[in-house]
Image (cartoon, rainbow, N blue to C red):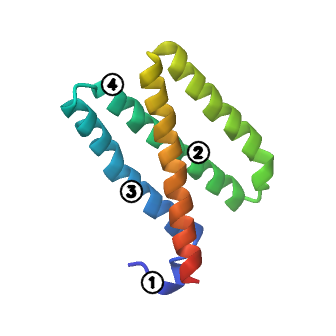
Amino acid sequence: MITESDSGSPEHVLRVMIRAAAIMAPLAVITMSLVGRPAWGGAAAVGLLMGIVNTVVAERLVAVGVPFLATSGVRLVVLTLSAFAALLLFKVAVGIAFVLGVSVAQVTLSGAALAAGARR
């Protein structure tokens, strides 16, 4: 059970983001499948998952004492290379759906963090 005292913790923000992405990823696949573009939905879902992985890695590294800025560049390079790989390996529209998925994950994280900060 989440109490008021832990609603602003990084773990709480991460849980909110994971729950939101767990809802959004299947919805993206289903919605895009209904409009005849299942690959777009799959790419967006994978992008959402990559955004979550990025967040989990950042949170875990900070928790063990690694400075956030020390890992930001590496994580940004990995996400950027993943986006370019998606663009090159698949059609451009599918690659863009992947990038949008990552973007939505990061916006979701920002929203969860802002909401947690507003409660404090």
Q: Which mark sits nearer the N-terminus, 2 or 4?
A: 4
Q: Residues within 10 Å of mark 2 (few under 14, many from 20)?
A: some
Tell me, for residue 39, which label it has, or none.
4
Q: Which mark sits nearer the N-terminus, 1 or 2?
A: 1
Give the CA distance from mark 1 to mark 3: 19 Å
Q: Which residue is mark 2?
A: 54
Measured as percent of width and height from the top left, residue 61 is found at 69, 53
Q: Amino acid at mark 4?
A: Ala
- Labels 4 & 3 near each other (Cβ < 8 A): no
> Left or right: where does residue 35 sit relative to residue 22?
left
Front label number (4 vs 1): 4
Tell me, for residue 3, which label it has, or none.
1
Q: Which mark sits nearer the N-terminus, 1 or 3?
A: 1
Task: Give SS at disc 1.
Answer: loop
Tell me, for residue 20, which label it has, or none.
3
Q: Which mark sits nearer the N-terminus, 4 or 3?
A: 3
Give the CA distance from mark 2 to mark 3: 15 Å
Residue displayed at 40% across by 30% down:
43
Residue displayed at 43% across by 23% down:
93
- Labels 1 & 3 near each other (Cβ < 8 A): no
Q: Residues within 10 Å of mark 1 (few under 14, many from 20)?
A: few
Q: Amino acid at mark 1?
A: Thr
Q: Nearer the viewer, residue 99 or 59?
A: 99
Q: How many marks?
A: 4
Residue displayed at 42% across by 24% down:
94
Give the CA distance from mark 4 to mark 3: 21 Å
Q: In the rendered view of the protein, which quadrant contains the N terminus? A: bottom left
> Left or right: where does residue 116 sit relative to residue 20?
right
Measured as percent of width and height from the top left, residue 26 is found at 29, 43
Q: Which mark sits nearer the N-terminus, 2 or 3?
A: 3
